[in-house]
Image (tube, rainbow, N blue to C red):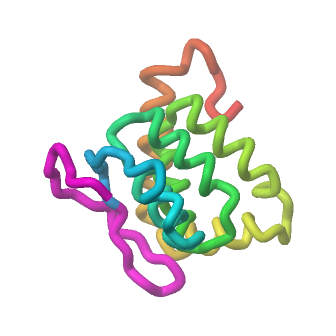
Amino acid sequence: MPDARVLRAGSLPVEVEGVRIALPSRIHHDEPGGEPERSLTGTQQVILHCLYSRHHDGRVRQRRLGMIVGSSEPWVIPFVVQLAGEYVVEILETILQGLTDLGVPGSCPRKLYGEFVARNPSYFARTERRMVSYWSCHHRRRFPEFGR
């Protein structure tokens, strides 16, 4: 990753499969792109996409989200859930398109996301409150019923 243009501390602690991890609240690194990014292994690319899903630019977050939302890696899930809590309509649409099986009982995404929520109830509750608050302030007129 290129050096950050702005240095800011801050992270969001969550638990994934019994391991505590810290999601960056925002990053201010330029995207590496090109050959440096193509030279990474598949797992390294997914990690990079996860990190850039925390980018300060919403377009970068949405583009990187599109590259990870369908992943079955448990450590990807908190990055997707965090973006849902930001309640940017275009990002939510990307999540909806990428997680079509989330509502299917017994599906892999349902199990993975259910496990994450069960291990992180306070994080999920805070994320849900943020989502409702953002909807109420910015989207209530366009979407009168939350969640529809």
Q: How many numbered discs, if any?
A: 0
Question: What residue appears at the point 48 percent right and 40 percent down from the top-left corner?
Answer: 131
Question: What residue appears at the point 48 percent right and 45 percent down from the top-left corner?
Answer: 85
Measuring from the top left, give residue 54's x and y in whole percent: 39, 50
Residue bounds of the magenta highlight: 1-23
Measuring from the top left, give residue 138's x and y in whole percent: 46, 20
> From the image, which quarter does the N terminus lie in?
bottom left
Question: What residue appears at the point 49 percent right and 70 percent down from the top-left corner?
Answer: 44
Measuring from the top left, give residue 124's x and y in whole percent: 49, 59
Asked if 103 appears above or below 44 in the picture, the reply is above
> From the image, which quarter does the C terminus lie in?
top right
Asked if 90 appears above or below 116 in the picture, the reply is above
Camera-side residue of 124 and 86: 86
Measuring from the top left, give residue 79's x and y in whole percent: 49, 58
Q: Residue furthest front?
A: 35
Question: What residue appears at the point 16 percent right and 45 percent down from the top-left corner?
Answer: 6
Camera-side residue of 63 and 135: 63
17 with respect to 70 (left or right): left
5 is within the stretch colored magenta: yes
Q: Residue furthest top?
A: 141
28 with respect to 92 (left or right): left
20 is within the stretch colored magenta: yes
Camera-side residue of 15 and 60: 60
130 with respect to 102 (left or right): left
Camera-side residue of 74 and 127: 74
Asked if 123 appears above or below 52 in the picture, the reply is below
